[in-house]
Image (cartoon, rainbow, N blue to C red):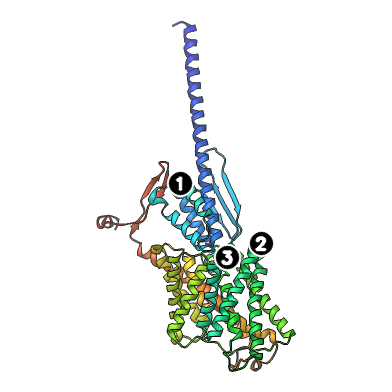
């Protein structure tokens, strides 16, 4: 072969090699672009799910776990950081592609346990139905745009029923029940309308508490001018009924849950919010009671501190309170029925622990512990968020009456005997301390019970394995746990 032919062959081989290298580079770029687009779609899907869960009342810990399950299902090793008002999802590819990081701020909205349940159920059934990204995103969008399950008159009716249940639980007469229903309805009406107009939550709480206190002042005035032969209503019971929905909606369960799960930033933010909202309730009560003293409204505080003597009435009242609060939080009918059963169980435990201790905070904590344990064990088969069952189940134990009585004695500045408190030691400081301890016991007890339920479920499924699957052909996920076959157990032992 001549030198010219040799040089021509070498040039041809060089050109072919360069062409093949260029094609490989172009293919790699296209593959990287496709992979980056898919990663962005997964991150967007995870972000939408996290936002919907967090704004509907889920804890940061629960939201993080479910978002990570979405990323694992589609084979995306992402980093997820969720706090009370911020969601951060980041993915760093192993190639030279740029990392993907998305952050979004979330404004906590109205608690919507029905929406939270739908999102959690969609994520949990994701692997079973092998849903792709576009189907998941479409279903999440449909859930997001669905209206709330109940009309406004149903919400107001649930609020009134909750107030009546509180009055029945505390042993009130027919007048107490009717006035408590009206006070709770009025407080919910004020809260809902102010929230719709974008009013700050602190002033919304204060205005709702003030409305209930105004009705209590009217009852005090009526007691002084109406004949004694007519049924007398208890002002404290009427106001306390209006306090229970406000206290139950503070989110102490999610606060304690994030704290126990070591999400301290979220727990700290929620704790500050609980303090601020409680301060709003106290401000509303103090303002109205101070105005009543200035107007020389006769001071009266009925010496009521226990429950009705009828056990069936107590259990029925607890069930009504739990179910009504569930409807206020937009729980579905089946979930509200489960909340009714949990509320009755909580009241039963509260009553049966009298043999162990006479301390009201301790008994409330024990009842909340069993509620948390029971809720964690039944939420998986019932497909109900655990935070929803716990929050509604402990609603009958909220210390609304203690809060009102303590603030009333603190503001009235008159001797205890003059306001109807014959029991020694029931001063304002003791009553408010009991209220604080009861709230803390409910929060810690319910969260500890849920943690015990998690441990029990892990021990029950100790002999199980996870089978990896291919998701959409290019990712890995996890199916449900499968019990080990006896032959497999023998091989692994």
Q: Secondary structure at mark 2?
A: loop
- Residue found at x 47% / y 60%: 117
The residue under label 1 is: 135
Of pointers 3 and 2, the one earlier in the residue sequence = 2
- Residue found at x 35% / y 62%: 461
Q: Position of residue 219 (x, y in %)?
A: 63, 84
Mark 2: few/some/many CA within 10 Å (<14, 14-19, 20+): few
Question: Is residue 290 depicted above or below 158 in this figure?
Answer: below
The residue under label 2 is: 198
Q: Is residue 183 visible?
A: yes
Q: Is residue 242 visible?
A: no
Report whether 490 appears left or right of 186: left
Question: Is residue 276 depicted above or below 428 in this figure?
Answer: above
Q: Does the residue at mark 1 contact the one at mark 2 (Cβ under 8 Å)?
A: no
Of 357 and 7, the residue lying toward us: 357
Residue 190 image-quadrant placement = bottom right
- Residue found at x 51% / y 48%: 45
Of 298 and 364, the residue lying toward us: 298
Cα distance between the residues tagged 3 and 1: 34 Å
Which mark, by number, is residue 341?
A: none
Cα distance between the residues tagged 3 and 2: 25 Å
Of pointers 3 and 1, the one earlier in the residue sequence = 1
Mark 3: few/some/many CA within 10 Å (<14, 14-19, 20+): many
Q: Position of residue 128 (x, y in %)?
A: 38, 51
Of pointers 1 and 2, the one earlier in the residue sequence = 1
Q: Position of residue 282 (x, y in %)?
A: 66, 76
Q: Secondary structure at mark 1?
A: helix
Q: Secondary structure at mark 3?
A: helix
The residue under label 3 is: 267
- The quadrant the N terminus occupies is top left
């Amino acid at each position: 072969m001549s030198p010219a032919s040799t040089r021509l062959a070498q040039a041809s081989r060089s050109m072919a090699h360069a062409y093949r290298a260029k094609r490989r580079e172009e293919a790699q770029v296209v593959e990287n672009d496709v992979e980056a687009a898919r990663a962005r779609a997964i991150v967007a899907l995870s972000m939408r799910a996290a936002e919907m869960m967090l704004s509907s009342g889920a804890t940061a810990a629960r939201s993080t776990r479910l978002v990570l399950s979405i990323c694992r299902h589609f084979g995306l090793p992402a980093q997820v950081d969720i706090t009370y008002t911020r969601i951060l999802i980041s993915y760093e590819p192993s190639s030279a592609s740029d990392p993907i990081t998305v952050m979004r701020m979330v404004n906590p909205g109205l608690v919507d346990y029905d929406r939270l349940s739908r999102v959690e159920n969609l994520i949990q059934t994701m692997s079973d139905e092998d849903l792709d990204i576009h189907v998941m995103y479409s279903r999440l969008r449909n859930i997001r745009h669905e209206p709330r399950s109940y009309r406004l008159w149903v919400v107001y009716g649930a609020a009134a029923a909750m107030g009546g249940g509180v009055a029945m639980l505390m042993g009130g007469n027919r007048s107490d029940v009717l006035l408590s229903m009206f006070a709770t309805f009025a407080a919910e009406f004020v809260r809902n309308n102010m929230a719709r107009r974008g009013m700050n939550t602190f002033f919304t709480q204060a205005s709702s508490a003030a409305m209930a206190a105004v009705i209590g002042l009217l009852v005090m005035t009526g007691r002084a001018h109406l004949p004694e032969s007519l049924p007398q209503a208890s002002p404290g019971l009427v106001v306390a009924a209006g306090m229970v929905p406000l206290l139950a909606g503070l989110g102490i369960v999610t606060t304690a849950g994030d704290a126990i799960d070591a999400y301290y930033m979220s727990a700290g933010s929620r704790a500050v919010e609980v303090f601020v909202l409680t301060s709003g309730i106290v401000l509303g009560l103090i303002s109205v009671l101070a105005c009543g003293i200035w107007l020389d409204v006769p001071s009266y505080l009925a010496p009521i501190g226990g429950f009705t003597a009828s056990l069936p009435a107590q259990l029925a009242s607890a069930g009504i309170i739990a179910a009504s609060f569930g409807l206020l939080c937009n729980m579905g009918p089946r979930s509200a029925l489960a909340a009714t059963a949990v509320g009755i169980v909580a009241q039963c435990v509260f009553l049966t622990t009298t043999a162990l201790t006479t301390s009201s905070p301790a008994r409330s904590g024990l009842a909340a512990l069993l509620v948390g344990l029971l809720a964690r064990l039944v939420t998986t088969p019932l497909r109900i968020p655990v935070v929803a069952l716990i929050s509604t189940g402990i609603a009958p134990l909220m210390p609304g009456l203690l809060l009102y009585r303590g603030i009333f004695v603190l503001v009235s500045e008159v001797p205890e005997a003059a306001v109807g408190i014959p029991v020694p030691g029931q001063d304002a400081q003791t009553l408010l301390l009991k209220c604080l301890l009861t709230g803390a016991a409910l929060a810690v007890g319910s969260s500890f019970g849920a943690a015990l339920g998690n441990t029990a479920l892990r021990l029950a499924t100790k002999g199980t394995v996870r089978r990896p699957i291919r998701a959409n052909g290019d990712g890995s996920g996890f199916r449900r746990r499968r019990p080990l076959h006896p032959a497999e157990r023998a091989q692994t032992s």
